[in-house]
Image (cartoon, rainbow, N blue to C red):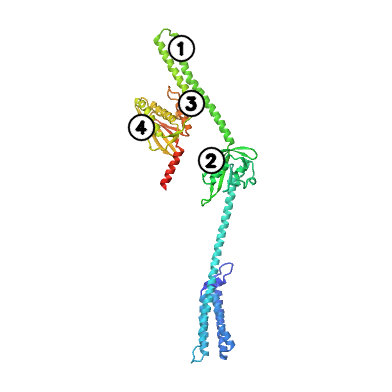
Amino acid sequence: MGSEEPVNSAIRPESGPPSDGHTQSVIHRSVLIIAGMFAFLSASLLYTGKMKATTWPYLVFEHLYYAPILYAAFIFGRRGGLIAAAVASIPHTVHSYILSPSAQGLDPNHTVEVLMYFVIGGLFGALRDVQDQRTRDLQQLGVRLEDAYAKLEERAIQLINVQDYTQSILRSITSGVVTVGPDGSITTINPAAERMLGIAEEETVPKPIGSVFEVDGGLADDVGRVLTGRIPLVINETELVTRGGRTVHVQAVTSRMRAVGGRILGAVVTMEDVSEINALTEQLIKADRLAAMGQLTAGVAHEIRNPLGIIRASVQLLEDRKGDIDQTQEIAFVIKQEIDRLDRVIKALLDFGRPNRPTFVSVDIEDVLRNVILFTSRFAREAEVRIAEDFHGHLPKVLADPDQLKQVFLNLVTNSVQAMHGRGGTIQIRTLHANEFVHIFISDTGPGIPASDVGRIFDPFFSTRDEGTGLGLTIVHRIIDQHNGHIDVVSSPGATTFRVRIPIAVEEEHGRKDEANSTDR
């Protein structure tokens, strides 16, 4: 009689869903109770109706039909209430026929009463169905909430584990790590930073980062620049003076800390104590300078001693060859050659020891190269060497000293021509722009540089030619260093390439970026 869903909802215990056997037992028991109520009321109505239809017991039993209807609607819902109403209308109609005169037919009150059975059964059953549905929804919501709570609890445990793991990492690393909030105040500081700076975390949180130092070395400014969004990362090597008066030389990396949505949460300052590293670096630089000085002294002694020995021998010959004009002139010519050689060595040595400071201006590198080709073209033709151009065109300008760059490329082109002298060949000069540098490649088809000598060609007084001073490429390397550039060489038999990289001018780079942005817009 009716749907089983309301029955299941009404009789479901809190511990869990009922078994099918239990549900069927409840249904059978409820049906028997309803049937017993109908049987009792019908019998009571028939008995009291024989007395008189208007007596109060009859009227009481007549209206008690609502009891099984309500009970059925409560147990089985709207369907059960309507079925119970239909069942109740049968004995009620039969009694009305029996008790009503045949001429008058059914009493109108009877029709109204039957309609009320259906109305009451349907409405109460519908309310019961709505209540059952709400109960089921609440149960489902409770299950979902339990699942959500379990997941939330699991996520909270994971976050706690991640936080513990992160804290363990921060406590274990040797670099000092300080985090600051959006307002520039310190939020956390790891033990390495505490040891490095000689302060405890409770003494710094939540103070502004600049206030925990006697001299912050510009660290507060770096944090401010990162937090205001002007720059995402700042690397600064500086000296910090702590409140205790201790000076610490650190390399500080300040980076922005963002949320998943992009909101700036603060900044992270990672500090590495480089005091010992700098001390060792200075010692290595001093040792390297001493070694270079020793190498330079040996080279100077060798380059000067040979001409002096030849001059001495020539003077001795002059002493022995009195009156021989031809031999005197020949010996004098040798002496002048060796003196010129000494002059070249001393001049190159002075250029190496006291280089001119570059005068930086905006330079078109391809104009410089065209001038170099013009200067060396005749010398190259005499050596049967062809110079080929492969220019990129429209290169960004570089900030450089044009005269010193001419010296660099004249030296490189001249060396390439001399390497191919008597053999003929081709020198190719190529340019391109990549990674904020202008690249210049000077390649020749000469015999190449032996692999054992490639690493030494920029050393002072190293030369593969007898007439060379060995300082040309050393000076080239120094000039490129002064321009914040790089030079390297790759060589194999039949192919040698020098690559020079010079950074482009800052304003040129900004102009190109602005032009690209305006084009995108």
Report x, y in % for residue 414. 40, 27
Residue at 55% x, 75% y is: 75
Residue position marked by numbered label 1 in the rendering: 315
Residue position marked by numbered label 3 in the rendering: 352
- Measure the C-alpha gap from mark 2 to mark 1: 64 Å
Neighbor class of circle 4 (other Cα within 10 Å; few <14, some 14-19, many 20+) is some
Taking depth in this image into account, of 9 and 506 the one nearest to the observer is 506
Residue position marked by numbered label 4 in the rendering: 388
303 sits left or right of 386 in the view: right
Q: Are marks 1 and 3 in contact (CB under 8 Å)?
A: no
Quadrant in the rendering for residue 222: top right
Q: Is residue 103 above or below residue 358?
A: below
The amino acid on which the numbered mark 4 sits, given as a three-letter code, is Ala
Earlier-in-chain disc, 1 versus 4: 1
Badge nearest the viewer, 1 or 3: 3
Badge nearest the viewer, 4 or 3: 3
Residue position marked by numbered label 2 in the rendering: 235
Q: Are marks 3 and 2 in contact (CB under 8 Å)?
A: no
213 sits left or right of 398 in the view: right
